[in-house]
Image: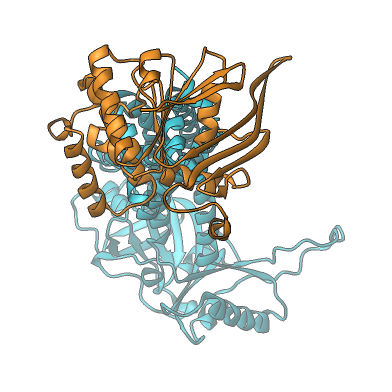
Amino acid sequence: MSDERLISPDISPLTSSLISLGGINRTFYLGDSQVHALRDVNLTITSGEYIAVMGPSGSGKSTLLNLLGLLDRPDEGSYKLEGRDVTTLDADELAAVRSERIGFIFQSFHLVPRLTAAANIELPLVLSGFPKADRAKRVSQALQEYGLTDRAHHRPNELSGGQRQRVAIARATILRPAVLLADEPTGNLDRSTGEEVVKLLEKLNAQGMTLIVVTHDQALGARARRQIRMEDGGVVSDIVSAK
Amino acid sequence: MLIADAGRFALQAIISHRLRSFLTLLGIAVGIAAVILLTSIGEGVHQFVLKEFTQFGTNVIGVSPGKVKTGGQPPTGIPTTARLLTMEDAESLKQLPHVTGSTPTVWGNSEVENNGRLRRTTIYGVDADFVRVFSAKVQIGSFLPREGAGDSRAFVVLGSKLRKELFGTENPLGARVRIGGLHFRVIGVLAPKGQFLGIDLDDTAYIPAARALELYNREGLMEIQVLYTEGTSSATVASAVKQRLALRHGHEDFTITTQEDMLKTLSNILNILTMAVGALGGISLLVGSVGIVTIMTISVTERTNEIGLLVALGARQRTILGLFLSESVILAVLGGVLGLLLGIGLAQFLHLLMPNFPVHTPWSFALIAVVVSGVIGLLAGVLPAISASRLDPIDALRAE
């Protein structure tokens, strides 16, 4: 598998295509009815991009996000992540790619309620079997970066919404993934904390992390350099603003 | 994921539902405690009974007349040709290698009378070797002297209770008592030996075997008990006894029972009893393990979101399976350890209340109990853990 990465022709360190989707189709069956969640989606995303995926509910944007995050497989089409065809990987290999290359941020944060902020941030390191001493260093660094040091030993129910999302972001980025996938990251936050969180994500993007945000929020979507609009499972517009 | 981390993660999940986890592990604890308590009692009874039987020494072989075998129906009207066991047989067995003593035995029930006090009791006809064969102790006076079969004098040795009944606090030595129609002189009293299977061993009188044959009008002995040196295999001695008697009788018309065989059979029976009561306790253990299945299933449903998150963070199916399995194993083992302490505590408490009540908890049971609870945890956790690891991460993340 790693050989493929080496011989892949269009890899150059700077303008490499991080993600390339070709002819992706995904159909769900709900009882008797068929839902065409993704229709013939073609998309190329380069490293370091800031993308907003917008569209009404049911337009397939969440399915796209799940697919990009390797939680779902396409029925048809090819998906290359960093030049590597990930549609042929088995479950364990997918898990490894998710762990190392992809960070998820959810609308409802999805923190483990019984674990402290520090333990929640540590979770990806624990799952990939990092030794304990190594983990402690990384976690304390992350807590500091996200301004959570004094909240380290609080459980999620003792944190504010903004703090919870910061913990979630710290958790998503602790293994330095290539892509950050955010599903309505400000959906459960008030405007000012939402703004704070978006700024944090944008800062990460400025440091070179590819950021893909799925949102209903026009204002949030407008901040992205590239806006992809979806309708009925297909991409209807893909605009790169001149900022 | 490192095993230590998985264990900690599972433990945190258990601790986060303190009451629920405690009640679940209590189910296992009660089951294990029941098994431990019941098997402790069973084992205690086992040891108690074996001790009762081995108080006469374990290196004893019994010979009784007549061969136990199954054959065709004997022709009617013809008396059996089995030869009786005689005093001479008993005497001859004393000469065998490894044999340290042998006593002929004849017993019956007679009235013993002293100065108008009458008591019906068991009379044993034995010889001088009796005290060694049955590990009996003489309290006062002496036991029956070693004499030839033909000229045994009319002496009697009393059991301690019989002495009390007939003589009270008087010194019985030298007194003459009447047994049946014959007169005997008391030459000793045995130390108290207690009861054995409901038989009072102290309410007895011992007279020379030859006299007992006369008293009960018998021609042959009822049994010969052979004592052999400790450490010799019972089979060796048994075969020597068999050879000697076969030579004397012309063929094998007697039956040899070694104490070892008897104890083995008895021990087997008692083991089955212990297992049976243990199995009764096992039923409550089964109920406890159903509790674990229930709580783990609930836990998986409640934590669907968390499972989705773990998958998104890159956990493998195997990791999730392992996490939930270790949770149920930890739960069960904690329950097992608690049950072990509870069971041993109860057993000791019983022992304290009733010191005569035999209770014994072997360490092997304790170890088995903990291992069994671990296995129960594993089995109980399998189904919920598999369903957790097979959840679709997208649905799991979306679940509220």
Quarter of the N terminus of chain A within the rendering: bottom right
Percent x, y for residue A176?
A: 34, 45
Q: Where on the picture, by quarter, is residue B189?
A: bottom left
Q: In the image, what residue occupies the spot 51% across and 23% down? A: A62
Q: In the image, what residue occupies the spot 47% across and 47% down? A: A16
Q: Is residue A141 visible?
A: yes
Q: Where on the picture, by quarter, is residue B307?
A: top left
Q: From the viewer's perspective, is B108 left or right of B251? A: left
Q: How many marks?
A: 0
The colour applied to the residues of chain B in this rendering is cyan
Percent x, y for residue B158?
A: 33, 58
Q: Which chain is orange?
A: A
Vertical placement of residue A110 versus A8, above or below: above
Task: Looking at the picture, tell me which residue is in the foreground, B90 or B254.
Answer: B254
Percent x, y for residue A189?
A: 29, 15
Q: From the viewer's perspective, is B243 left or right of B348? A: right
Task: Looking at the picture, tell me which residue is in the foreground, B349 or B287.
Answer: B287
Q: In the image, what residue occupies the spot 40% across and 50% down? A: B365
Vertical placement of residue B246 versus A31, above or below: below
